[in-house]
Image: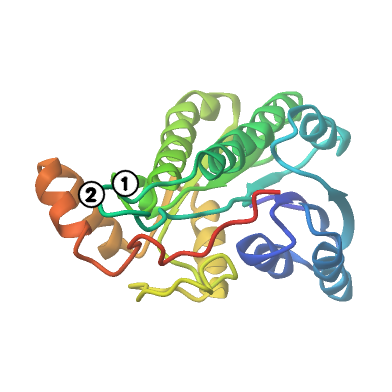
Amino acid sequence: MQHNTVLITGASSGLGRALAQTLARPGRTLWLGGRNTARLEETARHCISRGAAVHLNICDVTDTAAMAQWVHGTGGVDMVLACAGITGGTRRPTGMDSAATEPQAQIRRIFATDLTGVLNTVLPALELMQGQPRAADGLRGRICAISSVAGLVSFPGTPSYSAAKAAVDRFMVATGGNAKKAGILLSSVVCGFLDTPMVARNTFPMPALTDVNSACRRILRGLARNERRITFPLWLAAGSRLMDLLPITLAEAYYNNQPAGAPGSMPEPDLS
């Protein structure tokens, strides 16, 4: 698998940072993007210490023009990893005659980051790679976006997050059917809970919580195998697909009696 030049969004924290550090080595160039300058520079120092050449971009993936300029400004990349994302749940009812709700500002920010931010990364990468020569394996490049097992279900605890991740997975897999003919591999990562700062303050049990370094190895192994959908843990994804086949009322009766994702059990995301 050719990946001498790699672009990663969300590299200042969590999975994006772990992938950058895992991929850092002599002879490899990393283009790292993130919103937090101090944390992104910390990621860069670690990668440089392992011999990689690093270029930083302090950016917000919701900025369409800035993202396109950054991606095209690399001059060419072998692999793009769209890791930037946020999550958030519903709030507790405010009165006896009210229901759990998700604030409008949170809904819009999650869609802007987790869906539009992926498109702002993937679309210019597709344009860029179209002009690159094919490597010995016939590929011009690889583009990978992080979805979630939450995207397999209509989970009332995280409505907008589930919807945005579902859209990411469907877009990557559906578009990938055409892109592969042009020598560009599109992959969607459908994963469960990862031990990153994004979930560290959740106040409920997280089944199949996966070590982020193990997740990195699984993702890179899947890319090396040209997997279009990289799924783990399989049992959680399979169970989620089965839940989505149930009548809505039955599925909701189960979800609404679980501690996972109960109203108020997730911290409010940074909407700045």
**Residue found 25% across the figure and 54% down from its top:** 240
Q: For this rendering, which residue is in front, 172 or 137?
A: 172
Quadrant housing residue 163:
top left
Q: How many marks?
A: 2
Q: Amino acid at mark 1?
A: Leu
Q: In the picture provided, is 166 more to the left or to the right than 144?
A: left
Q: For this rendering, which residue is in front, 234 or 65?
A: 65
70 over 32 or under it: above or below: above
Question: Residue beneath label 1, please?
Answer: 152
Farthest front residue in view: 96
Q: Amino acid at mark 2?
A: Arg
83 over 48 or under it: above or below: above
Asked if the residues shown at circle 1 and circle 2 are in contact, with their CB atoms under 8 angstroms apart, the answer is yes
Q: Find residue 2 and report its horizontal and vertical position in percent.
A: 69, 50
Q: Find residue 120 and report its horizontal and vertical position in percent.
A: 67, 32
**Residue found 66% across the figure and 39% down from its top:** 141
Judge whether residue 193 can be spotted in this image: yes
Question: Residue beneath label 2, please?
Answer: 241
State the mark number for residue 74.
none
Q: Earlier in the sequence, mark 1 or mark 2?
A: 1
Q: Find residue 213 and report its horizontal and vertical position in percent.
A: 57, 74
Give neighbour class at mark 1: few <14, some 14-19, many 20+ (Cα, 10 Å).
Answer: many
Element at label 1: helix
Element at label 2: helix
The CA span between labels 1 and 2 is 6 Å
Quadrant housing residue 169:
top left
Q: In the picture provided, is 79 more to the left or to the right than 268?
A: right
**Residue found 44% across the figure and 35% down from its top:** 167
41 over 56 or under it: above or below: below
